[in-house]
Structure formats: structure tokens, C-alpha cells
Amino acid sequence: MQASSKPILVIGGGVAGMTAAVEAAEVGFHVLLVEQEPSLGGRVTRAHRYFPKMCPPTCGFEINVRRIRQNPRIQVHTLATVEEISGTAGAFKARIRIRPRYVTGSHSLDDAALAQLTSERDDDFNEGMSKTKAVYLPHDMAYPPLHVVDREALSDGDAEALSTLCPPGSVDLDMAEEEIEVEVGAVIVATGWRPYDATRLENLGFGRCENVITNVMMERLAAPGGPTGGKIVRPSDGQAALNVAFVQCAGSRDENHLPYCSAVCCMASLKQARYLREENPDAQATLFYIDIRTIGREESFYYDLLEDDHVSFVKGKVAQVDEVADGKDLSVDVEDTLNGETLHGTFDLVVLATGIVPNTADVKIPYELTYDEYGFVDGSTNVEGIYAAGCAKRPCDVSRTTKDSTAAALKAIQCLQGGE
């Protein structure tokens, strides 16, 4: 690395940002890794398993955390957002706002003691399907491994109780917001994605029917650290889900919602059908699809499920989901396009495969960049020194994200080295 090289700013601490950061740092460059959530990992840490190997996210996440912890060239800022970027390649300036955690890290906090608090918050890690205390550890794999205080949720009584429940100096409710300004040579945009808002799909029943959930919620139901301890159950009564409909392209490839394919939803639903079958050998999964889109070696993942008598595939776009009048079961109306029949099936759980929406569709990077019509950062942006990676650039899975992020790190290095 040239002695005069400025750090690389990586915006986003999910799998894309973590990968770009470690790849750049391990060849000698300093990196500022900025993440708006209290911990690194992004959406990947919410998954139960990766496809196609069906291994838990701890596999890759723990390796990257270890690489970050061991590399002094990486400086991590969580609860942080980039408010402004100015300048040009090799000489950018960035203003970063860091929100208070209210936990100093001087001592570990005891979850058993914190259980005495009465104020709670929705657990966003579990997609709002459970609660945490107002002082909470984001999740079991959280890095940094620090609790955080939800100041808005914390009651006055609990604020007073913290002085006796926590070691002295471990919680500082007067901690203030901080702003820093840094000079960086290149920027990698790795701001990730969010699922499409399923409440906009009125015909598919999300928010109207209690037992209609999304694919990201299904990941948390299946995860051992999820709201049900890994049991796939109906939200309405906690009973095991034995007859589950997976609705593909829920809002995707639809001019009224997301006109594009998100590339990963088919594989995600195939994976989740496996969750269901592994947990209960008597459970039945039905996948309603427009096309099954798998790539390369992932084809075998699909073909294996075709051999399962408890998994059915129906080619047709679901038109309507409603609750059956005499209970919480769900009726699903769909036209089977292969035989021309209209089907009216009854299920105890419906899982909507909602698509990928880039976070930059809502919050733009504070620099003049180009975006496509869906809000993804143009990967071939004409701004030298700023490069997009992962789902900030286009929908992609974990494997393709890591490759893409490595490429972005290389481009940033080449920019700082003057193209050498």
C-alpha cells in the first residue's frame, strides 16, 4: 500500500460490506466500515441456512468477524450513517453521524438481571414476531458483542432500575450523538436490501389474514434462535404448520409492484420447503410458481425436491388468499396454467416470497450517483472512486454477493493505486 493512500469507506456492514472490508484490509489498506444497525451482518444473519449447502449463516459470518477483529486496519462504526460525501476520487470527505448506544462496553451486562425490566420493544431481528427488553443484545452472534438501549422504549422506572441492575459505568443514558469527518480515497456502497412491503399485496392477505407470513419471517420461524425456537407454527394458535402454501413472485414480475425478478426467491422457497419437511415428515408443501428459476449447480436442489411425494408444484400465479369463514385456515385461489383449471386449495399457513428492494430506493447515498429505475445503484457509475456491491447494485445471493464485493474492493484499490 502506498503510504499516502487514504482509507476506503465501506457503507453497509452486511455480507457485502464485511467482505469488501476484509479483502481490502488484508492486502494493506485501511478501511472505515459504517453500519446503521447496532451490529454487523445485515440480512444474512437473520437467515436459518444458506442454499444450496444448507449450512447456518454462522459459517461465513464468524470467519469474517474473526478477520475483522484480528485486523487493526479495519475501524468499525455501528449505529452510524454517512450524512455527506464531497470531493473526488482519492480525496473524498465524508461526514458520519454516530447514534448513541448508551452502553459503554466497560462491563458485560447480565441478561438475567435485565429480564427484570418491564419495558419492551418489537424484536426487529425476528421480524417483529417477538419482543425484547428495552436493553437488549441484537442477537446471539452480534458483533460488536454489546447490548444496546432503545431509549424510546425504556420507561423512566426502568431507567432508574439500571443503576442497580448493571455494573457501575456500564450504561450511560446521557451518551450523546457524535459526528466525525473523515478523509477517504474511495467509497464502496454496500447498503443491502429490504423485503418488498407485503402489506401492499392486499389480495394475498398479509396483515389481513393472521396465518399469512413472508419468506423472511419463515426464516426466523425455522431458526433455533427465532421466536418459536425453530418450530414452524401458525401465528394464530401456535399449532404446527402441516399444510403450507409457498406463493412465488409475491409482488415480483408485476408492473404494479416490482417489475423485476429478485433472482433468489425460488431457491429460498425451495430451501424453506426443506425446512418444513425436515421438521415434520408428514407435512405437505405446495409451491405456486410462474417459473422455477435456479442457476447452475442449484438445479439439483430443485430436482431433489421433485422426488418428494410431500412437495407439489403448481404453475400459476395466486390471485387471492382469504381466511376460511369457520377458522384461521386459508383458501388460496389460483389458475393452474398447465391444465387450465382454477384451483381452490385450503392451507394452514401461506408463505409469500416477497422480492428484494434496494435500501437505496428509499435512502440515497449523499453524493450525486446514478440509479436505475428500481433504485439500485448503477454499478458502472461514472463517478470514479465510488463502487457499488451486492444488493445495492442488483439482486443477488450470498455467493454472488461475496464475489461482487471482492471485485468492488479491487476496483477501490486500483483507484487508490492510480490504476497500477
Image (cartoon, rainbow, N blue to C red):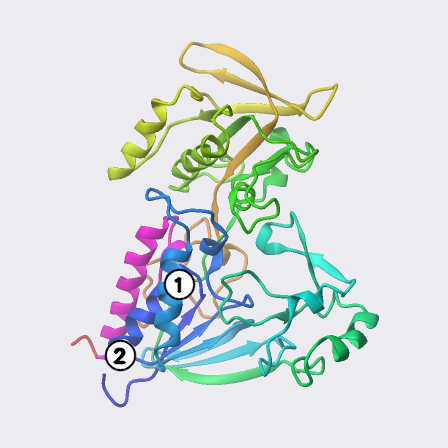
| Residue 64 coordinates in the image, percent (x, y) | 36, 66
Placement of the N terminus among the 4 image quadrants: bottom left
Give the quarter of the image for residue 7: bottom left
| Residue 180 coordinates in the image, percent (x, y) | 52, 84
The answer to whether residue 260 is left or right of residue 206 is left
Q: Residue furthest left?
A: 420
Q: Secondary structure at mark 2?
A: helix
Q: Is residue 358 above or below residue 300?
A: below
Give the quarter of the image for residue 62: bottom left
Determine if residue 131 is in view.
yes
Q: Mark 2 or mark 1: which comes first in sequence?
A: 1
Considering the whole magenta stretch, tell me its main secondary structure: helix
Tell me if residue 414 is in the magenta stretch.
yes
| Residue 120 coordinates in the image, percent (x, y) | 74, 60
Q: Is disc 1 surrounded by few (<14), some (14 to 19) or many (20+) residues within 10 Å? A: some
Residue shown at the point (34%, 22%) measured from the top left? 307
**Mark 1 lies on residue:** 62
Disc sitting over residue 416 in the figure = 2
- Nearer to the camera, 417 or 78: 78
Q: Residue furthest front?
A: 112
- Nearer to the camera, 147 or 91: 147
Placement of the C terminus among the 4 image quadrants: bottom left
Region rendered in magenta: 388-417
